[in-house]
Structures are given as C-alpha cells and as structure tokens.
Amino acid sequence: MKYQPRTKRRAIAATVMACMLCMSWAGGAYAAVPAGSAVEAKDTQAAVSELRYVALGDSLTVGFEPQLLKEKNPVPYGFVDRVLEQALYKGRAKLSNYGILGLTSEGLRIYVKAIQSGQSFKYADLKSVVADPRAASIEQGIAQAKADIEQANVITITIGGNDFGALLNEMSDLADDKAKGLVDGLIEQYTTNVTETVKMLKAMNPKATIIIADQYQPLPKYQREALYQKLMSVADQFTSTIDGMAKAFSDEGTEIKVAHVAELFKGREGELTHTNLMEQDIHPTQKGYELMAKSFAESIWGSYREPKPDSTGATTIVVKGQELVTKNLPTVRNNRTFVAIKDIVDAMGATSKWDNKTSTATIFYGDHVLTLPIGSKSASVNGQPLVVDAPAFLLKVGKEQKTYVPLRLLADGLGFQIENRTKAHTVFINP
C-alpha cells in the first residue's frame, strides 16, 4: 500500500526506490525466479500438466520492501513467490508476475483493457502514484500478458492500497460527514474499476480462478489511536465491499474468490508491516507477506503447506511434492548448484547404471536415455549430443562415491522442471 508523496523530498525518494529496483526487475513482468535459478526442460512434452499462475496488481504483487533499497542486487520475495512455491509442491508451475509499482484500481482497469484489446498504450495512462522503471517494457509486453492471461489457471489481484492511501493523511483532519463522503466515493470508484477489470479477465479466460485480496489497515494502534479506529472501520467496509462484489459475480454464475488478508493483520500491524510514516512506506514485512500467501493459498487450494524451517540455511530438495531425505546434500560450485543424481533418479522412479571402465552414468526415464561421462562438458540424450554447462563430478560421502550433476542437466537431459527457490532454500523437481 503506497500513496502519493506530499513533499518533493518524498517524491525523490519514491523515484530512487523505483530506479534501484530496476536492477532486478528488467523486463515487462519481473522474472518469476531470479536469473539463473529457474531451469525448465527444453523438450517438455505438451501432455505434461502445468499450473500457470498470473499475478496482477500493485507493489504488494511486486513484493516490495523498503530494505531492498539497501541491497546491491535487490530481489523481492513476496506473497506471489510463496504462492508459486505452494503450487510447486503439487506439480509443475509457471509464474508470470505483472505487478506494477504504485498502481491504482483505475490504472489496473486501464492496463487490463489495453491487454484485452491488444492495442498500444502509454504507461503514463496508468497514472501510477510512483514511477515504475520498467515503463517501456510494460508498454511493449501487452501481447505476452494477454497470452499468459488466456492460458492461466490462477489469477491473483492486489489492488486498492494506492486508492485509499491518502486516508492516512486526511481522515484525522476531516469531519465525520466529509470523511464518510470521501470513503464512499473511493469505494464506489474502486468497485467500478475492479468490476470492469474482472469482467475483462473473464472474457479473456472464463476458466481461470480469480482471487482478489482485501486491503489490510497498516497503521499500528500505538502510533495514532484515534485514527486507527477510523481506518479499521474503513478496512472493514472495504472487505464488505469486496465480499459483496464476489457474491454479485457468483449470482451471475462467475466465481470470484476473496483472500481475506485484512483480518490476519488486525492487531499485528506493527509486526506485519513496515510503518515508517516519515517515508510513507507501509508495505508488509516478510511475516506479512507469508500470511498473505497463506490466505491466497487457502483460497486457491484450501490449504497451505508450511515450509520446513532450517536455521542452517541448508537447501531442501522436494521431488514430486515429497521432501527428499538424504545424507547427500546439495553443494554449490562456481555459483552452480549440484545434486546427487542417484537420489533424484530413485525418487522420480527412473533407473540408472554405472560403467566403471568409462566412468559413465546412464539414466533411463520415460523415453529419455541420458548418457553422462564424469568430468565432461558433453553428454548425450537418446544418442544426440548435449552440451553441459558444468561437468558432473564424483564426491565422496562417507565411504561412498556419489555422482553430482548440475541442476540444469536434470531438465535438459531428463525433461524435469527444476525450480531453485533460493529465498526458500528449496529446490523443487517435478516430472
């Protein structure tokens, strides 16, 4: 939730924020996974089922936090990333994140209308309350966005924080009748914009599950108690509005789900949000984003799988939704993650054989036959040459020698989908 800065200093700060984030978010929609951490099979068969997830909305969808400004190469990790991970526990999944910094409900409507029509538009038309450094790419990415929406199974939306952000400044100075008029006007505007947006999305993809979040109230009670009560009332009204919209769509035969985020933040605002009012930044903390992800996941699948905590930061491998229990831990060499291939092969139900004379491993999986000489940057799949980005090697684990291979090889050689979720310290492997 980010609103229009009211001083030149704050406007400059907002611009700096956007420019610094540009380092990680090059492209129309920022990459679902940081560069180098996602590996997909090049020869994935069309028959393989894959959940396609599209995220639309404001900076909450982007996953912004203020400390990203202090990082050399900032990479957001918000609720969208965690929802993707929940999907990966269940099978193949692909994320297309179209979050835009400072987006209002009006801007979202304009954006989705441009996507639906396929006509060119100007980023300035979105009237975002802060500049997004990817403006040119957003303008150029309309066709891809439409294709992603049309193929999506799940679409999530966060919007409204920038519509209602001004209330933090204005509510305490307004008489009750004027405050009510302001809130009613904002809700009417929000309802119109979101209703039109949902209709356009459903026109493009009638089968997609759409989940919209309500808006949490970020101000802790201890900061401004009188204003806190007023804003809580507005948040409740906002939630009722979204629930009413969802019911109206349901009555028309269109199911829209609501992720009830606001309730989870009540009384925990100081813990779950960054409440630096001098800089007017009230985005969720990591705990806040995790609760948002839980709300969305439960709306989509009815459950949320708690990641296994590990204070050591060790990488967990999840194969077909099951955590791999092994003493052969992943290892990193030259910024590449290597895994013991025998563990993965066994967990996936593949078979393998070892030629001691040539130091060559052969793996059989479905119609894939991967031949892998140890120490070589070349391998073969079904007799066809395959260039390997890093050679496999033997690593002694206890009294045994284990063959370690780069993650990419599992995708290119055996057709697996590999997602290395570095923030979650988890590698997901799906057939």
Image (spheres, rainbow, N blue to C red):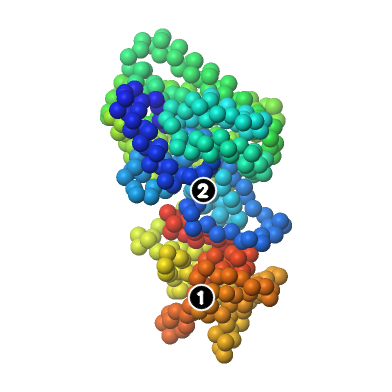
Q: Quadrant of the C terminus?
A: bottom right
Q: Is residue 257 visible?
A: yes
Q: Nearer the viewer, residue 38 or 222?
A: 38
Task: Using the image, determine if residue 82 lies above or below residue 180.
Answer: below
Q: Quadrant of the N terminus?
A: top left
Q: Position of residue 70 (x, y in %)?
A: 31, 45
Residue position for label 2:
31
Label 1 packing within 10 angstroms: few (<14), some (14-19), many (20+): many
Quadrant assignment, res 133: top left
Mark 2, secondary structure of its residue: loop
Q: Look at the picture and state if 412 lies above or below 125.
A: below
Residue in the picture at 42% in, 30% down: 130
Q: Residue 392: which numbered mark, if any?
A: 1
In the image, what residue occupies the spot 66% across and 33% down? 118
Mark 1–mark 2 Cα distance, whole angstroms, equals 28 Å
Residue at position x 53%, y 39% from top? 137
Name the amino acid, label 2.
Ala
Secondary structure beneath label 1:
loop
- In the picture shown, does residue 138 fall above or below 379? above
- Residue farthest bottom in this picture: 357
Label 1–label 2 contact, CB within 8 A:
no
